[in-house]
Image (tube, rainbow, N blue to C red):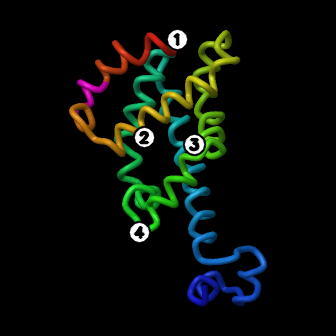
């Protein structure tokens, strides 16, 4: 905490007014990074003109980019990974991410407004499972696109 306070240019007691311990500082930083990542996901999704393309390419983007993110990759590889995963993939965190990433879907298909968050949550959980449990399609993005189009997409829209 001393190093964090020093780097932030504040006293250690001031830091403790906002955070109980270094894990809480770390979790807050990860939450902020996750929000930034969700914004990037939304921006990426908006490049596509159909809901089907937005769904497929959003999942691909998350599978491809999340492990590359220098800060969010800690959720996958850090010594606190189990605790981080629990927090990052909690219902509350997933809901926040899903609400943000549902926007590009609802923009293009307003009739799905009632289901947008649920669709987005399923997309997010599928993408995360592809990252955490790599398999045949984890790095074969053409194969993953085919899988999403034939097996996942029909159940979503």
Are dots 2 and 4 in contact, CB under 8 Å? Answer: no
Q: Secondary structure at mark 1?
A: loop
The residues bearing labels 3 and 2 have C-alpha atoms spaced at a distance of 17 Å
Rendered residue at 52%/42% (across/down): 40
Q: Main secondary structure of the magenta part?
A: helix
Rendered residue at 66%/44% (across/down): 92
Q: Secondary structure at mark 4?
A: loop
The residues bearing labels 1 and 4 have C-alpha atoms spaced at a distance of 39 Å
Please, is residue 81 above or below residue 13 in the view? above
> Sequence-wise, which precedes: disc 1 or disc 2?
2
Spot occupied by residue 90 in the image (x, y as percentages of width and height)? 59, 46
On screen, residue 124 versus residue 66, left or right, reads right
> Sequence-wise, which precedes: disc 3 or disc 1?
3
From the viewer's perspective, is the residue at label 3 or at label 4 nearer?
A: 4
Spot occupied by residue 17 in the image (x, y as percentages of width and height)? 78, 79
Spot occupied by residue 155 in the image (x, y as percentages of width and height)? 47, 13
Q: Which residue is mark 2?
A: 128
The residues bearing labels 2 and 4 have C-alpha atoms spaced at a distance of 19 Å
> Sequence-wise, which precedes: disc 3 or disc 4?
3
When asked about the image quadrant of residue 113, the answer is top right
From the viewer's perspective, is the residue at label 3 or at label 2 nearer?
A: 2
Look at the image and give the residue range highlighted in magenta: 140-144
Depth order, front residue of 92/41: 92
Q: Which residue is mark 4?
A: 79
When asked about the image quadrant of residue 38, the answer is top right
Spot occupied by residue 41 in the image (x, y as percentages of width and height)? 51, 38
Q: Residues within 10 Å of mark 2 (few under 14, many from 20)?
A: some
Q: Which residue is mark 3?
A: 39
The residues bearing labels 3 and 1 have C-alpha atoms spaced at a distance of 23 Å
The residues bearing labels 1 and 2 have C-alpha atoms spaced at a distance of 20 Å
Q: Which residue is mark 1?
A: 157
Task: Point out the image quarter for the N terminus.
Answer: bottom right
């Amino acid at each position: 905490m001393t190093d964090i306070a020093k780097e932030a240019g504040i006293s250690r007691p001031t830091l403790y007014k906002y955070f109980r311990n270094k894990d809480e500082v770390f979790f807050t930083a990860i939450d902020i990074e996750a929000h930034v990542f969700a914004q990037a996901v939304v921006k990426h999704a908006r490049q596509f003109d159909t809901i089907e393309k937005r769904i497929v390419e959003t999942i691909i983007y998350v599978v491809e980019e999340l492990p590359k993110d220098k800060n969010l990759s800690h959720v996958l590889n850090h010594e606190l990974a189990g605790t981080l995963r629990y927090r990052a993939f909690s219902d509350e965190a997933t809901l926040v991410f899903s609400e943000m990433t549902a926007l590009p879907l609802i923009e293009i298909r307003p009739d799905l407004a009632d289901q947008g968050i649920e669709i987005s949550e399923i997309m997010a959980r599928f993408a995360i499972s592809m990252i955490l449990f790599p398999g045949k399609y984890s790095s074969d993005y053409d194969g993953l696109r085919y899988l999403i189009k034939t097996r996942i997409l029909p159940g979503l829209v």
